[in-house]
Amino acid sequence: MKNDFVVVGSGLTGAVIARLLVDAGHDVLVLDRRPHLGGNVFDRRHESGIIVPDYGPHYFRTVSEKIWQFVNRFSRFHPYQHQVKSFVDGQLENWPIAASYIRRVCGEQWQPELKIERPANFEEAALSLMPRVIYEKFVKGYTEKQWGVAATQLSAGLCKRFDVRADDNPYLTPKAKFQGMPVDGYHAMMQRMLEGIPVLLGVDYLKDKQEFPARQLTIFTGPIDEYFQFELGRLHYRGQQRKNTYHVDSDQIQSTSQINFPGEQQQIRDIEWKHLMPPDQLDSLRGTVVTQEIPWSPNNPEQFEYPFPDEDNQKRYQDYRAMARQVPDVLICGRLGEYRYYDMDHAIGRAFKLAEKILSRTESPQDLLVD
Ligand SMILES: Cc1cc2nc3c(=O)[nH]c(=O)nc-3n(C[C@H](O)[C@H](O)[C@H](O)COP(=O)(O)OP(=O)(O)OC[C@H]3O[C@@H](n4cnc5c(N)ncnc54)[C@H](O)[C@@H]3O)c2cc1C
């Protein structure tokens, strides 16, 4: 049987596009090769009663009222603003680094280590923002652990993901007007987003393409290099190995949900999920669950998390993108299809744009990606 649209992947990109196409009156089939829907925001309720994600922590924040209203269609959110601490010199310090900490360590008139307009790599970009001692305590070790290479081998652009504060505001994203966590988790939210839309789980589209023809367009949100059977070589990703520990008799292990470890420790961060739970559920929880995350380079596409930020991989991605332009009636998109890190709100905003273009489509599928 043919559907107007086949959406491969039930993560945020696929689910939002599917929802909007169905809302516009089309028939859509969603496929996912995992045994669950929701892609990387999937979570489940642990025996303690705590909601624990399979693929790492997800804090929802956005500056867009439209995106906030959209997600609130599928879940209630409880207010939550994320705070991160870094374990530095045996103590927990604010991340992003508090202005008062830099003044205490480097003096009132501190200057960044470098004054250069066009940093050539991540290390130079970071040293253009802060004194060397701060970089070495908070940033260098964390970054090299995260990516598994020297900070000088990473693109300068990666620095855009953090800021040096002029104040001591402890929240990670104070500028985002809308922030929170879905009260019964992301899996429940994604189930409601896909309500009424046929979803086939445990189906790898790439193994059975001809079984799922689309009348109009296939929207593929898996890895672009895998779509082309890694013909031009693999795009490199980093991921995290996660170890959950259930402390059945403890109420709380750490003072905040996330602690970063920029030092010699094997793990990069510890997350205690209870801090993310709605306050009115806390009394019913038994014990607490902490997850330790250890960065690694996965080979299995289902474990791909962060696209590797360097020029070689960008160049290879662009070559794959050129191949994708030759494929008729398939749109390859999403974080894996575009080899790009998108926060959830950006993934949703991107899906809005793509759905709008699909619905008023005059371009060929791959031209839909042009902003
Ligand atoms: C560790 C980590 C932490 C994050 N934390 C945050 C956060 O705190 N806040 C925030 O805003 N964002 C966060 N994000 C970003 C967020 O996870 C993404 O924005 C979101 O997952 C993007 O959704 P997607 O649909 O593009 O990709 P995915 O969620 O990966 O969905 C793709 C889906 O396609 C399926 N698929 C792939 N290939 C096939 C195939 N051949 N056949 C069938 N199905 C296939 C996969 O199984 C998967 O379910 C984080 C990301 C990571 C990696």
Image (spheres, rainbow, N blue to C red):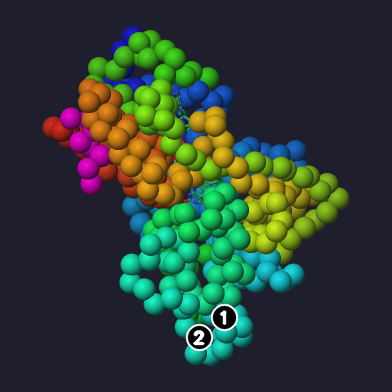
What residue did someone put label 1 on?
102
Does 345 sit left or right of 45 as displayed? left
Q: Do we see residue 351 in this rendering?
A: no
Asked if labels 1 and 2 touch by Cβ distance under 8 angstroms, the answer is yes
**Which percent across, then down, holds residue 352?**
30, 42
Which residue sits at x=53%, y=90%?
108
**Mark 2 CB near ligand 1 (8 Å cut):** no
| Nearest to viewer (mark 2 / mark 1) | 2
What residue did someone put label 2 on?
110
Front-most of 13 and 129? Answer: 129
Which residue sits at x=25%, y=24%?
327
- Which quarter of the picture shows residue 325? top left
Judge whether 289 appears above or below 12 on screen.
below
Does 342 sit left or right of 257 as displayed? left
At label 2, which amino acid type do we have? Trp
Q: Earlier in the sequence, mark 2 or mark 1?
A: 1
Does 105 sit left or right of 160 as displayed? right
Secondary structure at badge 2 equals loop
> What is the magenta range?
364-371
**Which percent across, then down, holds residue 336?**
42, 37
Which residue sits at x=52%, y=77%?
131
